[in-house]
């Protein structure tokens, strides 16, 4: 119920932001890509003021064409340094998409079966995990417990981690499952610890090397790192956490290298967009495979899960939405309909934190509101659509071709 309430609030906020941008002095009749760019740049400014976003970078594509690429705010507050298009952001759990994409590739190749136990591909798992499927680990429906302890639910700089994966699995061997696999969704990092270990076992190399050889190098992601080593400090942003309406620098957490399948991704909006475009174009798993596997997950209880083959899943105005959050402050999202061959949007929205702790879903949905309402406006104005365009932005349905587009 709480997740549903948050999502509803996010959608309402995205509609409000669209109306704010429409009244902000930006030309209201959409005729060119320049107008969309003005609207999105105004949206970044609106989000910064509304939520206290420190710095942000946004990139939007449609069918491989760049629609918008812009930045706003500060990479570092003290001393002040503005965000640039080359700024490197910590992307946190967006790193999980590297893992899920490589698993999808193995499924597409016939090397892994989603519905077989992960232990068939990865020896050494705790006995109670032996029958948990690859799909349940991907979708956070496995029931496995977290592999590290937190203080009142928060990570801290002194969080202790087991020395290696063998020790991780040994430490959890007597810990009961949180629930029967396939009956609930509960987001834990342990799921992707298992999947990155599966990839390491399959390729016979440590997971960071697997990611380098199969994603980072082939796609020429020259500004992407797993782990902080090597990240150039002159272009790296400072990550901030909300602190009673202000911002304070994040606590540094020394994640072990075996955790890089779920954390410690550092990258730029351009590199993330290149990765997302490669996925959408079928470079890893075939388009038909992706469309088939990116379906809402129905749990054994009849409820819908949150993820589809490792990508968070939603639906909006006839589009399916898949992507992932990063640290609750950044998000990537892909929108498509019945296929990936046309009318596919990619959104990369990176921030380094906000004073009001705004959820990344809210930010991305504000972008969707602007982009989709603009597309609907153009379709209506050209006669390609007969439905009143204002419905995309929650505007009155009485809008017509001769009136102002929202």
Image (cartoon, grey):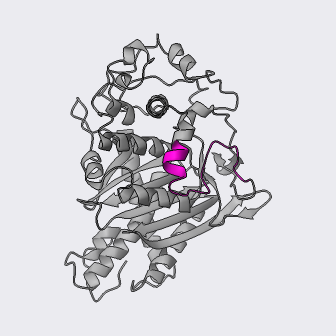
- In the picture shown, does residue 338 fall above or below 398? above
Find residue 262 and report its horizontal and vertical position in percent: 52, 38
Residue farthest toward the front in the current orientation of the protein: 204
- Depth check: give the residue in front, 402 or 398: 402
Of the 4 image quadrants, the one containing the C terminus is bottom left
Find residue 366 and report its horizontal and vertical position in percent: 44, 63
Q: Quadrant of residue 254?
A: top right
- In the picture shown, does residue 134 fall above or below 238? above
Residue farthest toward the right in the current orientation of the protein: 79
In magenta segment, residue 196: no
- Depth check: give the residue in front, 68 or 42: 68
In magenta segment, residue 215: yes
Find residue 112 and report its horizontal and vertical position in percent: 33, 34
Find residue 107 and report its horizontal and vertical position in percent: 32, 40
Q: Quadrant of residue 307?
A: top left
Residue visible at 41% across and 47% down in the picture: 6
Residue farthest toward the top in the current orientation of the protein: 174
Q: Can the viewer see residue 154 in this picture?
A: no
Residue visible at 42% across and 24% down in the picture: 122
- The span picked out in magenta is 211-232
């Amino acid at each position: 119920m709480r997740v549903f309430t948050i999502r509803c609030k996010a959608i309402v906020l995205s509609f409000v932001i669209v109306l704010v941008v429409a009244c902000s002095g930006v030309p209201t009749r959409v005729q060119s890509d320049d107008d969309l760019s003005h609207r999105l740049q105004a949206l970044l400014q609106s989000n910064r003021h509304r939520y206290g976003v420190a710095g942000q970078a946004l990139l939007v594509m449609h069918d491989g064409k760049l629609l918008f690429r812009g930045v706003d705010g500060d990479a570092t507050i003290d001393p002040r340094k503005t965000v640039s298009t080359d700024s490197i952001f910590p992307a946190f759990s967006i790193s999980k998409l590297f893992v899920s994409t490589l698993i999808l590739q193995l499924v597409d190749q016939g090397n892994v079966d989603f519905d077989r136990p992960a232990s068939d591909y990865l020896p050494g798992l705790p006995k109670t995990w032996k029958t948990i499927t690859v799909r349940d680990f991907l979708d956070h429906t496995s029931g496995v417990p977290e592999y590290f302890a937190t203080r009142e639910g928060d990570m801290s700089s002194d969080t202790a981690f087991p020395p290696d994966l063998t020790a991780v699995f040994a430490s959890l061997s007597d810990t009961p499952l949180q629930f029967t696999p396939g009956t609930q969704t509960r987001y834990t990092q342990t799921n992707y610890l298992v999947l990155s270990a599966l990839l390491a076992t399959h390729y016979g190399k440590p997971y960071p090397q697997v990611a380098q050889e199969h994603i980072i190098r082939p796609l020429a992601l020259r500004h992407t790192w797993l782990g902080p080593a090597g990240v150039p400090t002159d272009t790296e942003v400072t990550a901030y956490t909300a602190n009673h309406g202000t911002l304070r620098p994040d606590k540094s957490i020394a994640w072990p290298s075996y955790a890089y399948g779920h954390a410690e991704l550092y990258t730029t909006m351009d590199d993330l967009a290149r990765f997302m475009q490669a996925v959408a174009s079928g470079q890893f798993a075939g388009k038909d495979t992706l469309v088939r596997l990116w379906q809402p997950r129905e749990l054994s209880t009849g409820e819908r899960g949150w993820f589809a083959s490792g990508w968070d899943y939603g639906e909006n105005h006839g589009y399916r939405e898949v992507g992932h959050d990063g640290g609750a402050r950044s998000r990537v999202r892909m929108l498509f309909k019945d296929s990936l061959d046309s009318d596919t949007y990619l959104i990369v929205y990176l921030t380094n934190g906000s004073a009001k702790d705004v959820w990344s879903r809210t930010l991305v949905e504000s972008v969707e509101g602007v982009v989709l309402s603009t597309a609907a406006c153009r379709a209506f104005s050209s006669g390609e659509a007969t439905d009143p365009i204002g419905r995309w932005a929650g505007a009155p349905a009485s809008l017509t071709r001769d009136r102002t587009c929202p």
